[in-house]
Image (cartoon, rainbow, N blue to C red):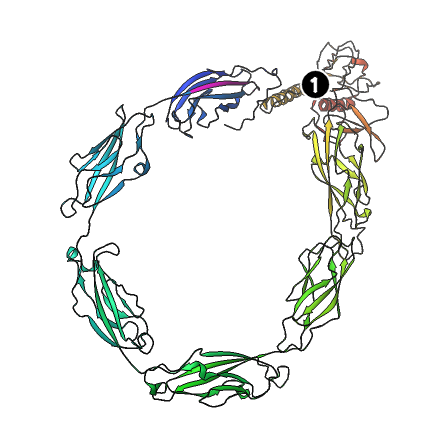
Amino acid sequence: MGDVPWPVRLPSSECPGKRSQLLKGLPATSTIEENSAAGVSVYSFNVTVSPLASEGVAILPTIVNSNPLTEAFEIEPKGDLEFRVVTTGNPVLDYETMPKSFDLEIFVEDATGRTDLNILTIQVTDKNEHPVFRGNMAIQTVTVYVLERTPPERIYRVDAADPENAKLKYSLLPATVPFSIKENGDIFSTKEFDYEKDPHCYFLNITVTDPDGLNSTRTVNINIINVNDERPYFTTKQRIYRIPEEQSPGTIVANITAKDPDYEDSPSRLFYSIQSSNRHFSINPATGVVQVTGRIDRDALPLRLHPNISLTVRVEDSPSSGHAREMEITIVIDDVNDNPPECNPSSFRKEANENTAPGTFLVDLRNYCKDIDADPSNNQFIFTGLSGFGSNYFALESNVSGRLVMTEMIDLENPANPGVEVYTLTVRVQDIAHPNYSNIIYIYIRIKPVNEFFPVFRNLSYVFSVSEITKVGSSIGRVHAIDQDWPPNVITYSIVAGAGTSDYTNIFWISPTKGDVRILARLDYETTQKHIFTVQASDQEKSTTASVTVIVLEVNDEEPVCLPNFFSLQIPVNLAVGTNINGFRIECQDRDSDPRSFRYFINEGNENSHFTFSPSAGSNTSRLILASMFDYESGLDTNWVYSLRVHITDDNLASARGKATHLTKTGTVTLSIRVIPSPTTATTTTPGFTVVTRRENLYSPSAWYVPFVLTLGASLLLGLLGYLGLLLLARLRCPPPGKARSTPLINAPEKKKSKKEAVVTMTKLNTVFDGEARDPVTGRMYEFNTRSGARRWKKSNEPLQPMLAMQEMSITTENNGQGVDRAEAPSKNESSEKRKELTAATKPAAKPSAGQSETAG
């Protein structure tokens, strides 16, 4: 509703609970029609302001609240002090779904601080609206598909509604179409359509009308779908085809063609397929071409026994649920001698322990090999060509038997051994008959190592030095062990003893594969300085152990802890600088730092640096001291409650001298300090024409012209007084020397002159020093102003000044030679000096800054 805070603050010139009548024309009641667009005027009113409010309205009329809550209205200016309430369009008012009435609370404030708050009641009125379509028809043109030869039936239901819930009437145009619409919106077809004779598409204009004649229209598009009712037929007459085995994929075997009476001019609409499951052939679904898709092996079952392949070819005029015909074709596979001997498996994997004795039998290849050619002259084979790296350790007993045996012993740890674990051998199995087809047999002999040696740690014991602030999960060192077996066994590492404390079951963790030692819990030098545990290296069969010592290095990781860590204080606004506030002090402790290393900072909330701690460093106790006076009178200080966030660090460089590194930790204390204003000081009066008044500052930021007018008037008055003083001094004679008054105001005239009279009025605003205190450093007394914070050193024989006063002095000079207020006439030179003092006295004194001396003019 706006940025005006609520509740509204009444100005100091008005009594609480009262408001002025600023909103002319309110409270009031107005109406607005539903569905009104944004910017529609709802109600107009005027604002009346006080004649003293030359600035007009300080806070423009604003909707501060509404019941029920809404953002549908806002206020915009209509003239100088004329405004109107308009709709925003967010949201659009709806009589059927939204509240029927809104109470808007309108607030205004003029430049003098007067306020007014009144209510405008807005009632929403109903408006008859057009019927609306719902569902798909609300957002698009609906298309309905009807199959030909479908009997008359309901094909679609129109869904519409009236915002006022009135009964609607449906109608359909053009009237010549074979469709009708019922009272409930159902659209019916009135005939059975024939795609070849009737139109293929109809456009229906559906109109829905309410009882007042308002209507809405939408279009329904109806398409008639053709139905295929004729079966295709084959035009290819051939039924038997012959091809040799091992034909390349893609080889054309047959070209099957067909036609469809429904689409004589578009044969591409037919779809071909092979119904029987077959991996050797495929048919192009669009052209009917039969091709080889996979290898055809005449010597493999089932073609070895039955070399004929039968295919059932199907043609249809639709991919699914269409009319179709089928026919069977036969493909004869001619035999070709093309098979080499085959071994199953074609590769063998055997194991032998190192140091296996020569002559040991490994594998008999003939038990796994055969030739599948049908002719017995083509299924005889032999084994030849044993080769491969290290084949000298192995041999075949004969090329017919295919038995593989060891010829030499293999020792993996022997330096003369090539160090090979797996030997790859190849043997050729080959047909005896032409064309001598052959295959390669792969034999992988793995020499299985024997675990003969224990793992050995490189060091009998390990020592790691770790900082106590090392992050959990960090690596602190690594252990390593080796195995003399070849190939080296996989060594796994584990902690078997001593890795925990009373607080943690396991403080350390070791990587099972790398031997990397990590910490699982935070180390603490102040608790434990050394950890000793045992690690084990194992090759799954044999194991050995080593000792690990972790030395914890001390680091400054403990932050100072101070009491109290939260405290609330109250101090008077005129408390003397250097005072220990309420005798407050904090005491701090640190587990790993010398108290002499503490330093104290006020990190947050110390506006204008009024507070400090003494001592600020080098002690575990410190007191809160007032460092400077408060100055609320001049506006320098505005905060009456201070929330200080004090940081205590253990980074005193003097106490850390000689250390290689020095970390810093910080403790925190929160102080809440409330400044208590002093009561109004009683005023004193002085003899003579002195009037002492008490004033209250009612200055408002909007009344900027007040100090401007006062300053301008004072300047003009000072100029006039200066000019009169010069004229007066020019007519005066030099008086005889005599005793002068301690504080001369004007020059006394000579005796026996014609009677002249001069009136000088001086208005001076004095800084009142209404308090005194002793400086904690020098011990001297000083005076201060409790509001502005101005200070000056106190003279030993000078009392406190009175409060702020307006002094008016009138001085009359006569020709009878009598002095004013016992003042004697000054000399000519003294006259010039006194004139300067008089001019300086009439000027307004500059405002002293906090901490400077200020004396009366």
Q: Nearer the viewer, residue 422 or 626?
A: 422
Asked whether 389 or 756 is in front, the reply is: 389
Horizontally, residue 635 falls left or right of residue 83, namely right
Outermost bottom residue: 398
Is residue 776 on the magenta stretch?
no
User: Splitting the image into 4 quarters, where does residue 682 fall?
Assistant: top right
Q: Judge left or right: residue 216 versus residue 425.
A: left
Judging depth in this view, the residue of 517 and 471 nearest the camera is: 517
The stretch in magenta equals 110-122
Q: How many numbered marks have been drawn onto this rendered protein structure? A: 1
Q: Which element carries disc 1, helix, strand or loop?
A: loop
Q: Position of residue 296 (x, y in %)?
A: 31, 75
Who's the residue at 25% across and 68% down the image? 311
Compared with 254, 108 (above or below) is: above
Across and down, in percent, residue 387 comes to 49, 86
x and y percent of residue 529 in the render? 79, 57
Q: Which residue is mark 1?
A: 763
The kind of secondary structure the magenta stretch mainly shows is strand
Say which of 820 and 168 sits in front: 168
Q: Position of residue 652 (x, y in %)?
A: 78, 48
Identify the amino acid type marked 1: Thr
